[in-house]
Image (spheres, coloured by chain):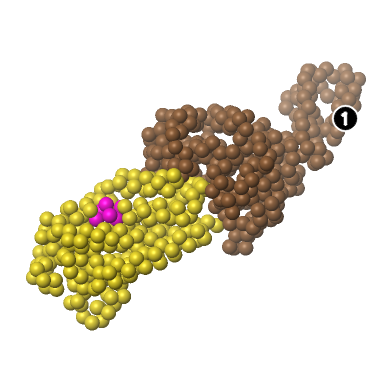
Amino acid sequence: MPFFAIIKKEVYRFSSIWVQTMVGPLSTALLYQLIFAHQLASVNTGIPGVDYATFLIPGLVIMQVLLNAFGNGSSSLIQSKYTGNIIFVLMAPVSPMSMYLAYLCASILRGVAVGLVVYLGIMWFGQIMVVHLWAVLYYAILGAAITGGLGLIAGILCEKFDQLGGFQSFVMVPLIYLSGIFFNIQHFSPIWKTLAMLDPFLYIVDGFRYGFVGQANFGVIHGAGFVLCFALAVNIVGIVLLKRGVKIKH
Amino acid sequence: MYALEINHVTKTYSNNFKALDDVNFTLKEGDFVGLLGVNGAGKTSLISSVAGINSFHGEIKVMGHDVLSDVVNAKRNIGVVPQEIAFDPFLTVMQTLKFQSGIYGVNDNQKWLDELLERMHLQDKAHANTRSLSGGMKRRLMVAQALVHKPSLIILDEPTVGVDVEIRKNIWDFISELHQQGHTILLTTHYLEEVEKLCNRIIMIDKGKIIAQSSKDELINQAGDLPSTLELTTVNGRFVAVLSDLIIGRDGNKYILRLSGHEQIATILNALVSNNVIIENININKPKLEDIFLHYLGR
């Protein structure tokens, strides 16, 4: 089936450059863990019985899930547009929906695979264990679906690598860094807290951390609903753009 | 059933450039048709519309399937070799063909893929990364990609640019075999001698409009006043002054004469014989496709 052929190719693509796609994120997470957990060991996490090193681990894992899911869809599409080989998929008997979902699934797979590698690499720095598996899987998969979808939208709309870089630097990174990965947002000043609460990634990070520490700042079920709606909205926009051939067909 | 039906197809780009202007033609199953036009005439816009890469107004059907309302079935029947070289830099040659097979829903075709690589002279590159291929090799790989699913309609947009003469001949031999097996072929190329040799019909396009479509001989008849030439080689290069107005070229003892009609041949031969000019060789050249093409373009 064309759907699986695209997924297989994408998995081959990101696994063939594993130093960049797997070792790189692990190295970044290790550095964050070593530096932040050491320097900020005395910071109150706001969660009884959870030290900062343990608090940080789920944050760093989900950060890499989100960033890598975004990177897969965006880089794959823009590279295919740049080298022209996207034409082979566009000419094939693959519906836009099927094509989009295949790229999205590949993005989720990469995000989750990188998350697993990062988790296995940094779990030793705290007292971490999975408390609610459903929450870990739900927020990792839907979080990757959101940023994977955003990556595909960026890949569809951007025509140059610098445009994509701008999207990543000015949209993705601020949203991810404000989402409570490094700090409990309850400790933010009121203005920053208000801003952070507008960040949809906040609920992904909060729900994902709930899966490990068993406590959340916001209602987990409420967050799960919000994340599901956000994932659907982002990907409906992506499917419509691809179906219309925006910046892809002439 | 027609292999390809193009009905009132118009394509206007966002900058208001009209690349196709009410284009109409059909290809019967088993046709081998040459699509000729100068750069920018609309050939690639037309092919892109058929392949589903361009939006357009009008109707295009492939093997009876509308390319807009019955996209999947229409696309299953087409194999296109695009004009621009494109390749996936992460894949090897064989992985490229397997991926291509996969997106066309074809499995278990290893034997056919091996044959394609052999016919495209790429068998020793099967496991080489596509980045390491030369331009000609990449183009041959694109030809193989277009054929993985054995499409009914094969569209070749400048498939042999940058391919050396010997391999080019092998590719055409292979394409001719596919044609004999019943595949319909639409070809654009700047090598007009290839079109002349291979195609049973020719369609000419200029400024987005079809300006002629027929067999080569019919196109000559329709053109009417296209001149043939007569090549005469005489002993010692002797000739007669009365015919000097007809001479359009000379190469040693060989004279090239312009013919306004074939009845002129008898007059010329009579003049030479009556002046005791001994003819060593004689050759009548019909108009070349290039002459016909330029005639229809009005250039």
Residue sitting at x 78%, y 37%:
B218
Quarter of the figure with the N terminus of chain B = top right
On the image, the x and y values in percent for residue B21 come to 69, 56
On the image, the x and y values in percent for residue B155 come to 59, 41
* Residue A170 picture quarter: bottom left
Residue sitting at x 88%, y 29%:
B263
Give the chain ID for the yellow colour: A
Q: Which residue position is annotated with label 1? A: B264
Answer with left or right where residue B181 lies relative to residue A40. Answer: right
A111 within the magenta span = yes
Circle 1: is it few (<14), some (14-19), or many (20+) Cα within 10 Å?
few
Give the chain ID for the brown colour: B
On the image, the x and y values in percent for residue A17 come to 30, 47
| Relative depth, front residue between A144 and B259 | A144
| Relative depth, front residue between B243 and B78 | B78
| Relative depth, front residue between B212 and A94 | A94
**Number of marks drawn:** 1
Q: Is residue B190 visible?
A: no
Secondary structure of residue under mark 1: helix
Answer with left or right where residue A86 lies relative to residue B289. Answer: left
Q: Is residue A29 visible?
A: yes
* Residue B29 picture quarter: top right
Above-or-below relation of A149 to B84: below
Chain letter of mark 1 equals B
Region rendered in magenta: A110-115
Above-or-below relation of B166 to A202: above
On the image, the x and y values in percent for residue B195 come to 66, 36
The kind of residue on which mark 1 rests is: Gln
Residue sitting at x 57%, y 43%:
B78
